[in-house]
Every structure is written in C-alpha cells, then in structure tokens.
Amino acid sequence: MSSSAAASPEAPRLRRSLTLWDLILYGIIVIQPVAPMSIFGVLTQRGHGHAATMILVAMIAMLFTAISYGRMARAYPSAGSAFTYVGQEINPTLGYVTGWSMVMDYMLNPIICTIWCSEQAHVFAPGIPYGLWAIFFVLLFTGLNIQGVKTSARINSGLAVGMGVVIAIFFVVAARYIFGHPHDGTGFFTRPFYDPNLWNTKAALGGTSIAVLTYIGFDGISTLSEEAENPRRNILLATVLTCLVIGLLSAVEVYVCLLYTSRCV
C-alpha cells in the first residue's frame, strides 16, 4: 500500500461571503421596512385603533420563532432551512413536503413582484405597454440573481438606504403636521397604544393574528446558512435582530400614522 494516498477532491460548496450586516439587510429587504402599511387599515379597524400595540405583541411572539430558527440553523448550518430542520428532526418525508412548499413560495414571489412592478411602472409610464414592462422586469430580476449573492447584498444595501430615506421623509412630514396643530395633552400620544374607552382584549388578540403578517419573510435568512460567515452564530443573531428591528420600526410607523389620522379627524 502506498504511504501517501491521493487526496480526494474537495466537494463543491458555496462561498461564505455574507457578513452579519449583509444577513440583517437581506432580512429587512425581504420583509420590507414599510411592511405594516399594507395591513394598517385592517389592523386599525380590527383593534379599535390599537394597531401599534398589536404589532408589538406580535413581535414578542415572532421573536420566539426567530430564536427557534436561529437555534436550528446552529444545529444544522445548511441552506435547506425548514426543509432540513423538518427532515432531520421529524421525518424525511415531511421534510420533502416542506421543501416543495418552500419552492412554491420562491416560484410565486418573483411572479408577484414582476406583476406588481410592471403594473406600477405602466401607471407612471402608460406609453410603454404592460407586456414590455413585464419582459424588462423579468430580465432585470433574472440578471440580478445570476450575478451572485455578494452583488445581491450590495443591491440590498442600496435599497435599504432608499427606503430609509422615504421613511425619514414620512416621519419629518408627519411630525411637522402633528406638532403644528393643537392636541389634548399627553393622552393624545398614549391613545394609539392604549385607549381605555376603545380597548377590547378579544379584538386586540384577533388583530394580533393579522399583525404577524408584518414579519413574514425573516425565516429566509436561514436559507443563506451555507453562504454566511460563521453561520452557527450569525444566522441566529441576524434572524432575531431583523425581527426586532422590523418590529420596532413598524410599531413607530403605525404609531405615527395613528397620531396623524387622529389629528385629521
């Protein structure tokens, strides 16, 4: 037997190039910094004006889910996410079903984004047919995805800055309006969180089940386990921090909206 065996070629693997900050930005972009705006009207109606409180209660519940995802990523630092977790911990068949369920999500999301972006672009530029906009966005999204995960991380940084500027402008305009008009003391600023005249525990809990939609998508961070630096640590931190940042930002956005709308009434 030869004293030196030929070394077996290393199995191909993804490059670990995503930092903790990249993972957090990815989670924020997937969820969207303006996530609560789409359900603001429903939350306000269902919770009798306590939408901010419901988002904070939902955040506490979702933090437990985020911690669970992070701990599973520490045990199984694989890109399979829920597919791997279910298959390893419960049953491979159930993991297979979970994996195909996730694939449907990743198939539908690009289609929805293409349709929405094409519709909005057609509204701003009606002279260009909707079909051409759809082709443009399909090519754009495809091109961005094949550039690699590091390019996606840089694009996410730019999108986060752009959305941050829009949110900052919104806060400044709303603050000028709110403080530029008279109000009835400190109670005006606390009512969005708790108004004893309108509070209904059953309605608030029912609204909280809708408020969790604000956080949909943070679990996608765990799919980057094989492209993240130190995934056993960073996936957990990024998942929890993303959930926390989105929760607090969403609560502030909704709080300001409630103050603004109550001032307009």
Image (spheres, grey):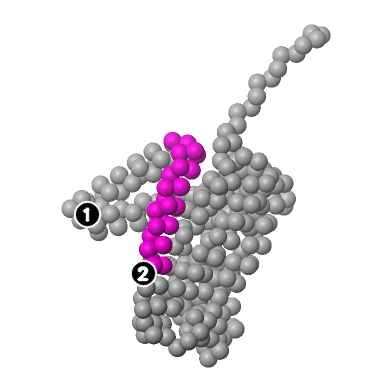
Q: Which mark is residue 173?
A: 2
Q: Amino acid at mark 2?
A: Val
Which secondary structure lies at badge 1? Answer: loop
For disc 2, the neighbor class at 10 Å (few under 14, some 14 to 19, many from 20) is: few
Q: Position of residue 15 (x, y in %)?
A: 57, 33
Q: Residue furthest left?
A: 127
The stretch in magenta equals: 147-173
**In screen coordinates, is 100 left or right of 7?**
left
- Looking at the image, is 153 positioned above or below residue 176? above
Task: Look at 51% across and 86% down and name the residue there.
Answer: 187
Which circle, 1 or 2, is nearer the viewer?
A: 2
Q: Who is closer to the viewer here, 198 or 79?
A: 198
Q: Residue 42 is drawn in which quadrant?
A: bottom left
Which quadrant is home to the C terminus? bottom left
N-term mark: 1 or 2: 1
Q: Amino acid at mark 1?
A: Ala
Q: Residue tagged by mark 1?
A: 125
Residue at image coords 53%, 91%: 197
Displayed quadrant of residue 232: top right
Q: Is residue 229 left or right of residue 138?
A: right
Where is residue 117? Give x, y as percent. 34, 54
Q: Residue at x 60, y 31 (%)?
A: 13
In this rendering, the answer to whether 172 lies above or below 17 is below
The answer to whether 7 appears left or right of 211 in the picture is right
